[in-house]
Image (cartoon, rainbow, N blue to C red):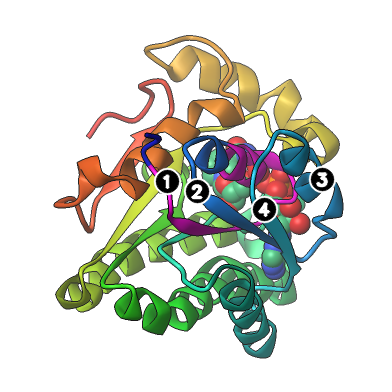
Amino acid sequence: MANLDGRVAIVTGAASGIGFAIARDLARQGARVAICDVADPTAAVATLRGEGADVVGVRADIADEEAVAAAHAAVVAAFGRIDILVNNAGLFTTITRAPFDQLDVAEWRRVIDVNVTGTYLFSRAVWPSMRAAGGGRIVNITSGSVWSAPAMMLHYVTSKGALTAMTRSMAREMGPDNITVNAVAPGFTISDGVLEHRHDMLATAAGRARSARALQRDQAPGDIVGAVAFLCGDGSAFVTGQTIVVDGGAVMR
Ligand SMILES: NC(=O)c1ccc[n+]([C@@H]2O[C@H](COP(=O)([O-])OP(=O)(O)OC[C@H]3O[C@@H](n4cnc5c(N)ncnc54)[C@H](O)[C@@H]3O)[C@@H](O)[C@H]2O)c1
């Protein structure tokens, strides 16, 4: 029997990139999976259905409270329950990299709105369903940049720092409902979005990331899924409020 047989998982930002890899892995572990994305999830859903997965797609901007409520309702209508939420959607690959004093304040606000407030809104929306199911798992995708503190993206690093703190405090508040809240912090990962938008970083940051690692190679989305699956499965039932850094051993804490 697969580890997640019978569980229902929502993965945000799963139309592509790291989120898609997580959704595919949870489906392979036996979960029924909802792919939630502001972009059209049709192709991602078709791919996973083609692999035999029980998958639905829902389109929502996680920073929009009404859209999140509608997405939650759509998943409950499709699958009847929610056991797992992976808050993966975030703005990274399309943000402007600039010295802190030159960042556009509107973009700063949007990054905080999506990466922090969106994660909060989705977690709050699924909480009643998880309580009704007797417990649940929330996994937030943060970033190794919280520790490595790279320059030129203060809005992003700030948002992921907030998410790291939110993970701990939310774990404290949801613990009495048997809901664990943990985070996975990837290093620089060659995702779809990076390949499409981050030619600047592929030329510079990828090499720096490789040489900073104990395991000196590029990081792929598939490197992240095992830690997420662990935090969604029975083996981590007594683990909460924690962050697992998955970066090939660049950050060691
Ligand atoms: N790629 C990296 O190097 C890296 C490293 C550490 C952490 N992360 C984090 O991992 C997550 C995924 O990164 P990725 O590289 O796969 O990014 P990506 O840009 O390839 O994919 C992000 C997905 O999120 C969706 N999305 C964006 N805004 C959304 C919104 N408001 N509502 C719903 N969906 C939205 C996009 O449509 C896209 O499908 C992000 O949270 C990112 O911060 C990435």
| Residue identified by numbered label 2 | 31
Task: State if disc 2 and disc 1 touch (CB < 8 Å).
Answer: yes
Vertical order, 23 against 249 (above or below):
below
Q: Write the residue at 60% across / 59% down.
A: 100
Q: Which residues are magenta?
A: 4-24
Spatial CA span between label 1 and label 2:
5 Å
Spatial CA span between label 3 and label 2:
16 Å
Q: Mark 4 CB in 8 Å range of ligand 1? A: no
Q: Nearer the viewer, residue 191 or 57?
A: 57
x, y percentage for residue 247?
43, 28
**N-term mark: 4 or 1:** 1
| Residue identified by numbered label 1 | 5
**N-term mark: 4 or 3:** 3
**Dot 1: within a 10 Å radius of its alpha carbon, few (fewer than 14), some, or many (20 or more) residues?**
some
Spatial CA span between label 4 and label 3:
9 Å
x, y percentage for residue 48?
72, 40
- Number of marks: 4
**N-term mark: 1 or 3:** 1
Spatial CA span between label 4 and label 2:
9 Å
> Looking at this rendering, what residue extends furthest in the bottom direction?
66
Q: Write the residue at 68% across / 24% down.
A: 204
SS for dot 4: strand
| Residue identified by numbered label 4 | 55
x, y percentage for residue 53?
65, 43
| Residue identified by numbered label 3 | 46
Residue 189 figure quarter: top right
